[in-house]
Amino acid sequence: MTTHDNSFCRWSFWVRPGTSWAEAFAQNFASPDIQMWPEETDAVPAYFEWASPHLNDTASFEELTDRTTALKAVFDGAMLLACGSSFHPFDLTSLTAADPRDRPAPSHLPLPGDVRAEPFSPFYIQKKVSRHLDPLDDPVARNVFLARYDDVTRSILKYTAVQGLTYLTLYAYRDWMKSGGWDDAKIALEAGWSKSMLSDFTNTANNPAYLGPFSRHGGTSIAPKRPIRLEDAEGPMRKAIGSFLLTRASEVNLKNKWLSISV
């Protein structure tokens, strides 16, 4: 079953993920917000097109640049949450117009633009879309779709894309979860940690004696007795924030929002 429809994307970008999973990902990724399809070739595709209907109604190349930057950050953040640090965000190159009447277009936008821009088209989010683009069962597509309706999710995904999966980002997840009503006991439970392990993580992330320039704080301190390595903290904290985003999806009734626009 086709999981993309590139016919309604006004603009697309060529990308080269350079990873073996890209072809399978493009074939199976169903999303009303992001489209990705491989080049036409008899060999294993090296290049793919990345596109979104949210870019269709941009009125200038400056607006196109900013919205693309913001939307790509939402996508990259969702990918990093789902795949971890094994995902390396790819560059968008070679802007292509689907309609010749949109030419001449600059082959390369001055990316990145302003990542703080609104990533979603207020016109497109109200349009009906094919039910075959159901995003709810895929964590990447679901979180991008959720970011349409939830400012917290949008902020988390953008922050993740801009900062990467660092101690700063993982600690920021704790801040977002606590602001959303979760206490440390709940965060530790969702991470699969004990409360003392979560405490060890926060002590590590805040400690300039152990992390130096990678610490959340400056100054001097005593190194933590039980430091948590970044590679050991990443998975549990991604798991916890993933559970938190599922609660956000439930709170905004994401399933009903999908049913209201799918045909």
Image: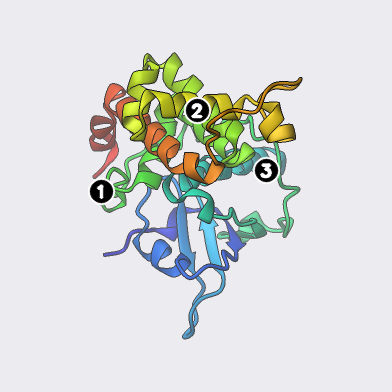
Q: In the visual, does 152 lie left or right of 261?
A: right
Name the quadrant of the C terminus.
top left
Q: Describe the element under mark 1 as helix, strand or loop.
A: helix
Sequence-wise, the earlier of marks 1 and 2 is 1
Sequence-wise, the earlier of marks 3 and 2 is 3
Q: Which residue in the structure is indicated by mark 3? A: 65
Residue 159 location in percent, x, y? 58, 33
Residue 204 location in percent, x, y? 58, 29
Mark 1 is surrounded, within 10 Å at the Cα level, by few (under 14), some (14 to 19) or many (20 or more) other residues, namely some
Q: Which residue in the structure is indicated by mark 1? A: 131
Q: Describe the element under mark 2 as helix, strand or loop.
A: helix
Mark 3 is surrounded, within 10 Å at the Cα level, by few (under 14), some (14 to 19) or many (20 or more) other residues, namely many
Q: CA distance from mark 1 to mark 2?
A: 45 Å
Q: CA distance from mark 3 to mark 1?
A: 29 Å
Select label 3 or label 2 by which is in front.
2
Q: Is residue 238 above or below residue 180?
A: below
Asked if disc 1 and disc 2 are in contact, CB closer than 8 Å, the reply is: no
Residue 116 location in percent, x, y? 63, 29
Q: Is residue 62 above or below residue 50?
A: above
What type is the residue that disc 1 sits on?
Arg
- Of residues 152 and 59, the one nearer the viewer is 152
